[in-house]
Image: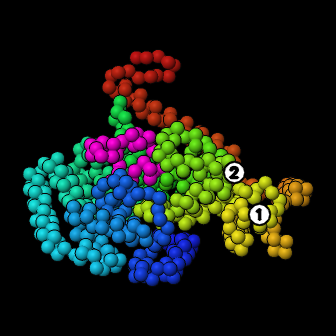
């Protein structure tokens, strides 16, 4: 799937971030050139407590992202990612983490690759791959569908563990023709979703979610995994920058995931190999703030009994939404800005933080300005905690993009609303209606004059004699057919119909 082009605001944020890192931290120059974003502020979360909520590949990916994006947690996160990688089988991921750690701490013992472990793991992977392929070949020779399906399932898990995501997707996709139950199709689709999310291929995620939903739950059984489907669809829509659709998907997540035990691998509602209920609260809340108006935020978010369970896990998101609904925009933005470093270190949110925050701030300025006919730039700058120069640049960009219907009086340093003269608009609508009436009347008068002058073009109708001849011909044909039928009956001795109505 082709990578989507980033908006200008995201590229500008990355450029400013890099320039600031370059000027402030020369020792991190090589890292800032290698990786696209580097966060200088300390996050609010504790790394050990945060990462303990995840498992599988996403745990390593999140540690790697934090290690390559945070100046405070880089060494700690990369070492933790290195330890997790050595517990698995993905040699390529291990080598990538080692290279990143070497760029930051060249003299650290952990920054030197463990060649013995790499060689041993490569041999084990090769042997395991050969064994699974031979077993699958034997299952195919025996023509047992269930065994073939399980063979592809084992091979797909193996490829997923070693980081060969394309082959993992192929193996899981080949399971389809050997699935005999709807539960088998659902299991296969969930595998494809997990592999696609890890690989950043979002189109297969959406198609697999739709496939599972088309199966429907069994009669009398609860719809297990509905929160997984909604959250996976939300991630795909978030990656496509469809923030309104993503918010709707996250808001529709079943609250049973909140009660799921993350440490229990048998819990069907746990989905911490991809994301946690806290992530759903953050993703859903930010997407809703960026794409919904105040009435929608009140009814679809704050009064949503299902999503309320998720918001309780992230109370600052609930407070930010409540402040926005209550027109306390500066308080809302202050809360979001305090958690901005945390969101820049999120695996699925990092590429969207700048755009989401920009949309929320734009909406706040527009909503703040609605009750006024004019506002001084000084008052706006004070309300949104910035200076007049920056607020002026923001307003100019908003007016150019059509987000704000206003103009700036630079002489008096005020923002003026573009008021519409209601009397003039009524007059314009009346004149437009009168012109339309005159045009219609002229068209009808022209048609009447054309008819009166005999210029109307009419369709030619056949003469009446043709209909009479056609009717007589049809009658003769019917009489002949009836005579033939009755003569046949008479020859067989079954009687015939004579003129006069008598039977013989």
Magenta stretch secondary structure, dominant: loop
SS for callout 1:
helix
User: Which of the 4 image quarters holds residue 220?
Assistant: top left
Q: Where the N terminus falls, by quadrant?
A: bottom left
Tell me if I can see residue 81 in this picture: yes
Q: Position of residue 462 (x, y in %)?
A: 67, 50
For the point 38% across and 21% down, which residue is it?
Answer: 495
Q: Nearer the viewer, residue 55 or 123?
A: 55
Residue named by callout 1: 379
Q: Position of residue 443 (x, y in %)?
A: 84, 58
Q: Is residue 445 left or right of residue 251?
A: right
Give the magenta range.
253-281
Q: Is residue 158 left or right of residue 75?
A: left
Q: Nearer the viewer, residue 155 or 447?
A: 155
Residue named by callout 2: 327
Q: Where the C terminus falls, by quadrant?
A: top left
Q: Which comes sooner in the sequence, label 1 or label 2?
A: 2
User: Which of the 4 image quarters holds residue 447?
Assistant: bottom right
Q: Please, which colouring scheme is shown?
A: rainbow
| Number of disc labels | 2
Q: Position of residue 150 (x, y in %)?
A: 18, 50
Dot 2: few (<14), some (14–19), or many (≥20) neighbours within 10 Å?
some
SS for callout 2:
loop
Asked whether residue 273 is drawn in magenta, I would say: yes
CA gap, disc 1 and disc 2: 16 Å
Q: Position of residue 225 (x, y in %)?
A: 36, 43
In the displayed structure, 392 sits above or below 443; it is below
For the point 38% across and 70% down, which residue is it?
Answer: 74
Tell me if I can see residue 96 in this picture: no
Dot 1: few (<14), some (14–19), or many (≥20) neighbours within 10 Å?
few
């Amino acid at each position: 799937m082709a990578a989507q082009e980033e908006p200008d605001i995201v590229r500008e944020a990355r450029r400013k971030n890099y320039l600031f890192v370059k000027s402030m931290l020369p020792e991190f120059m090589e890292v800032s050139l290698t990786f696209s974003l580097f966060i200088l502020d300390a996050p609010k979360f504790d790394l050990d407590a945060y990462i303990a909520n995840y498992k599988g590949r996403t745990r390593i990916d999140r540690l790697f992202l934090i290690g390559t994006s945070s100046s405070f947690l880089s060494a700690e996160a990369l070492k933790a990612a290195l330890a997790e990688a050595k517990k698995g089988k993905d040699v390529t991921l291990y080598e990538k983490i080692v290279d990143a750690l070497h760029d930051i701490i060249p003299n650290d013992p952990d920054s030197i690759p463990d060649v013995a472990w790499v060689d041993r793991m490569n041999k084990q992977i090769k042997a395991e791959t050969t064994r699974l392929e031979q077993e699958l070949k034997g299952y195919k020779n025996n023509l047992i569908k269930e065994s073939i399906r399980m063979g592809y399932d084992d091979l797909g898990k193996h490829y997923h563990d070693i980081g060969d995501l394309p082959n993992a997707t192929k193996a899981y996709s080949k399971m389809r023709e050997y699935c005999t139950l709807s539960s088998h199709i659902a299991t296969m689709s969930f595998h494809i979703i997990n592999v696609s999310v890890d690989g950043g291929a979002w189109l297969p995620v959406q198609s697999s979610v739709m496939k599972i939903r088309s199966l429907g739950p069994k009669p009398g059984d609860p719809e297990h995994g509905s929160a997984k489907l909604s959250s996976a669809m939300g991630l795909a829509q978030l990656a496509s920058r469809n923030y309104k659709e993503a918010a709707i998907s996250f808001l529709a997540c079943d609250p049973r995931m909140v009660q799921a035990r993350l440490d229990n691998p048998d819990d069907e509602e746990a989905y911490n190999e991809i994301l946690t209920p806290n992530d759903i609260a953050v993703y859903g809340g930010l997407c809703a703030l960026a794409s919904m108006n105040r009435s929608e935020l009140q009814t679809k978010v704050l009064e949503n009994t299902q999503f309320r369970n998720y918001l309780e896990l992230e109370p600052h998101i609930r407070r930010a939404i409540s402040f926005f609904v209550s027109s306390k925009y500066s308080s809302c933005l202050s809360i979001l800005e305090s958690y901005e470093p945390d969101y820049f270190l999120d695996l699925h949110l990092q590429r969207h933080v700048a755009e989401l925050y920009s949309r929320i701030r734009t909406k706040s300025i527009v909503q703040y300005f609605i009750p006024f006919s004019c506002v001084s730039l000084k008052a706006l700058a004070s309300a949104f905690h910035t200076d007049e120069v920056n607020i002026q640049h923001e307003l100019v960009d908003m007016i150019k993009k059509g987000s704000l219907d206003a103009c700036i009086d630079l002489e008096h340093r005020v923002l003026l609303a573009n008021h519409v003269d209601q009397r003039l608009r009524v007059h314009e609508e009346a004149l437009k209606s009168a012109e339309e009436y005159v045009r219609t009347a002229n068209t009808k008068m022209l048609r009447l004059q054309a008819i009166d002058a005999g210029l109307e073009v009419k369709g030619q109708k056949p003469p009446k004699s043709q209909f009479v001849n056609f009717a007589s011909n049809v009658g003769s044909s019917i009489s002949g057919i009836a005579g033939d039928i009755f003569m046949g009956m008479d020859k067989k001795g079954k009687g015939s119909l004579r003129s006069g109505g008598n039977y013989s």
